[in-house]
Image (cartoon, rainbow, N blue to C red):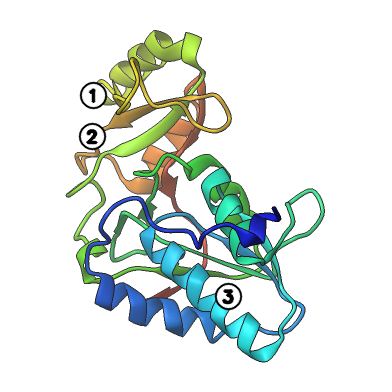
Amino acid sequence: MQWDQLDAPTWPEPITNQAAKQVVAEQLAAKANDGDVIGIGSGSTSYLALLALQERVAAEGLRVRCVPTSLEIESYLSQIGLEVTSLVAARPDWCFDGADEIDPEHNLIKGRGGAFVREKLVFAAARWRYILVDESKFVGRLGEKFKLPLAVIPEAANLVRSQIFDLLGELPQVRPAGGKDGGVITEQGDLVMDLAVTGSVPIAELNSMLNSVVGVVGTGLFTGFEFEVIS
């Protein structure tokens, strides 16, 4: 059996605000051009956009190549027959992704789904970017609704906690996994830890601090990127 003969992919849980997210997804799919290399984000809004993109590709005979940001999205792409490539082989002309929070200065928190390291690689590589959000994702400051995820080398967990406490007076916590003992592990083999963002440190300074912490591989803080918001 070919992978594109498998059952159509389904999102593993109910999608919140699905009607609004569907409108956003269809706006995004309309932007595809023949020959595009597209970075495909993770998350429920990106999933809906992926399906809308596939419908347009099939209807108009477009040829696009897709750079996925997670193994889950890579599997979906194969199941619905869209061509998969990678950052090794191609640079995205543009990409799309969701966000957990977006502040008035267009800083983002991403990573509730745990794919934020690979998402940031694709985001940084793309020549242009679209962020797909509904109204629930806009906040006055980052950290209002969600904590900031960190990808941490597992053996450095206590070292990272100690350094961050010295810098910020906050202790990041290991994100507990569902269905297994222990914490959430990223596709790169890193431990996910979540850090409360209090707003006491400016975002640019916080970004610099966290990137200087030995043992932190990446963060879900996306700052300094240019992108268009579709909501």
Residue 196: mark:
2
Measure how far apart labels 2 and 1 are at the Cα level: 7 Å
Which of discs 3 and 2 lies nearer the camera? The answer is 3
Residue receiving disc 3: 54
Measure how far apart labels 3 and 1 are at the Cα level: 44 Å
Q: Where is 50 relative to 102, above or below?
A: below
Nearer the observer, 52 or 3: 3
Q: Where is residue 180 in the image (x, y as percent from the top left)?
A: 35, 20
Which of discs 3 and 1 lies nearer the camera? The answer is 3
Q: What element carries label 2?
A: loop
Q: Residue at x 51, y 24 (%)?
A: 190
Q: Where is 80 relative to 184, above or below?
A: below
Residue receiving disc 1: 170
Amino acid bearing label 1: Glu
Say which quarter of the image contains residue 53: bottom right
Label 3 or label 2, whichever comes before in sequence order? 3
Nearer the observer, 82 or 202: 82
Label 3 or label 1, whichever comes before in sequence order? 3
Mark 1, residues whose alpha carbon is within 10 Å: few (<14), some, or many (≥20)? Answer: some
Say which quarter of the image contains residue 33: bottom right
Q: Where is 196 relative to 156, above or below?
A: below
